[in-house]
Image (cartoon, grey):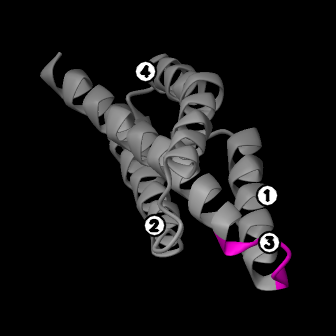
């Protein structure tokens, strides 16, 4: 078992690692596809996921974690069951999409870059919340 604020650090590491990996895949598909239009689309994907998915997720899970009455929690409590399910669906869908060859490399470049950057930012925000929790 770990202190509850450590759960924020675990969320930071998991989301930042996932974001970094997805961003890396997206950027690896970008050579030869760097256009103003594609960069704009990646920015739109980033902003949609940042604002409507991961920003809310960071806020929701931070409040849940810091609201635990018990100071010590099991390490897997950094997420709730629906969040683990969402992560599994996203991973399965992403791997399946790339393995199937259905998505063109241009789509992967644009979508994965925006999504990966939003995930990475969510991880960094969990890290910031961890630092703040440790200081208080």
C-beta proximity under 8 Å, tags 4 and 3: no
Residue receiving disc 3: 97
State the image coordinates of residue 114 (x, y, percent, origin top left): 54, 47
Residue receiving disc 2: 27
Front residue of 84 and 3: 84
Front residue of 61 and 92: 92
Mark 4 and mark 3: span between their CA atoms? Answer: 36 Å
State the image coordinates of residue 19 (x, y, percent, origin top left): 47, 55
Query: Which stretch appears magenta?
Result: 100-105
Q: Residues within 10 Å of mark 4 (few under 14, many from 20)?
A: some
State the image coordinates of residue 86 (x, y, percent, origin top left): 75, 48
Quarter of the image where one finds residue 121 = top left
Q: Residues within 10 Å of mark 2 (few under 14, many from 20)?
A: some
User: Is 94 placed above or below 8 here?
Assistant: below
In the rendered image, the quadrant that contains the C terminus is top left
Q: Earlier in the sequence, mark 4 or mark 2?
A: 2
Q: Does the magenta segment cover residue 104?
A: yes
């Amino acid at each position: 078992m770990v202190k509850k604020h450590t759960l924020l650090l675990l969320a930071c590491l998991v989301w930042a690692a996932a974001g970094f990996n997805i961003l890396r895949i997206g950027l690896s598909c970008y050579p030869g596809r760097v256009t103003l239009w594609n960069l704009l689309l990646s920015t739109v994907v980033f902003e949609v996921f940042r604002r409507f998915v991961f920003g809310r997720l960071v806020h929701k899970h931070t409040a849940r974690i810091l609201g635990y009455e018990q100071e010590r929690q099991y390490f897997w409590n950094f997420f709730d069951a629906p969040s683990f399910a969402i992560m599994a669906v996203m991973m399965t869908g992403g791997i399946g999409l790339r393995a199937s060859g259905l998505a063109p490399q241009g789509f992967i470049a644009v979508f994965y870059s925006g999504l990966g950057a939003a995930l990475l930012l969510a991880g960094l925000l969990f890290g910031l919340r961890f630092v703040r929790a440790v200081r208080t």
